[in-house]
Image (cartoon, rainbow, N blue to C red):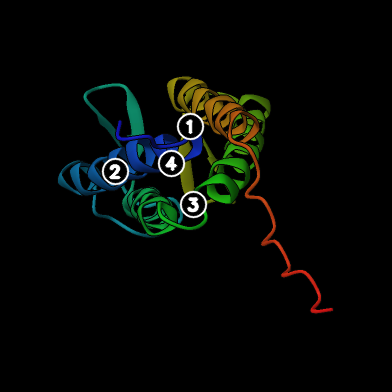
Amino acid sequence: MNGRTPAQLYALLVGGTLVIAGIIGFFYSAKFGSPGKVRDVFGILSVNGWHNVVHIVTGAAGLLALGYAARAYAGVLGVVYIGVAAWGFILGNHENILGFLPVNTEDDVLHALLGVTGVAAYLATPAAPSAARPAPAT
């Protein structure tokens, strides 16, 4: 896609998808609270108002990072989502992370996939070379 790096593709695709998922999630549950009214999007993924906000914010961060910090976004989001997936798997099905973010097994699998692909995009994208210093005048 026009010479984009793997991290830029990740930031664009995952960022855009998370924003859209967060917006769609509000049609299922816009309730806030601990955990608020939890509904399953498409009968699969558990959401509430807070979960939707997290998706919109993390997705928007990816779209903002697209031009200048896509590698950092992919790496950080990848590690965070792997941690969230592990936390969810430890808690079990239909529980809440931090007492207000609902998760189920399907959420945990999706978070793990987003995490692994984020770390892979980070590793597949070379670090930006540091700016070359001009040679000293003689």
Quarter of the image that includes the C terminus? bottom right
Label 3 secondary element:
loop
Name which residue lies at 59% across and 37% down: 78
Q: CA distance from mark 3 to mark 1?
A: 33 Å
First along the sequence among labels 1 and 2: 1
Q: Position of residue 134 (x, y in %)?
A: 72, 70
First along the sequence among labels 3 and 1: 1
**As drawn, 42 above or below 126:** above
Q: Position of residue 6 (x, y in %)?
A: 48, 32
Q: Would you name the residue on which mark 1 appears? A: 6
First along the sequence among labels 4 and 2: 4
Q: CA distance from mark 1 to mark 2?
A: 15 Å
Q: CA distance from mark 4 to mark 1?
A: 5 Å
Residue 16: which disc? Answer: 2
Q: For the residue marked with disc 4, what is the amino acid?
A: Gln
From the viewer's perspective, is 135 left or right of 105?
A: right
Q: CA distance from mark 4 to mark 3?
A: 31 Å
Q: Position of residue 3 (x, y in %)?
A: 37, 34
Label 4 secondary element:
helix
Label 2 secondary element:
helix
Q: Are marks 1 and 2 in contact (CB under 8 Å)?
A: no
From the viewer's perspective, is 90 left or right of 5?
A: right
Q: Would you name the residue on which mark 4 appears? A: 8
Q: Would you name the residue on which mark 3 appears? A: 100
Label 1 secondary element:
helix
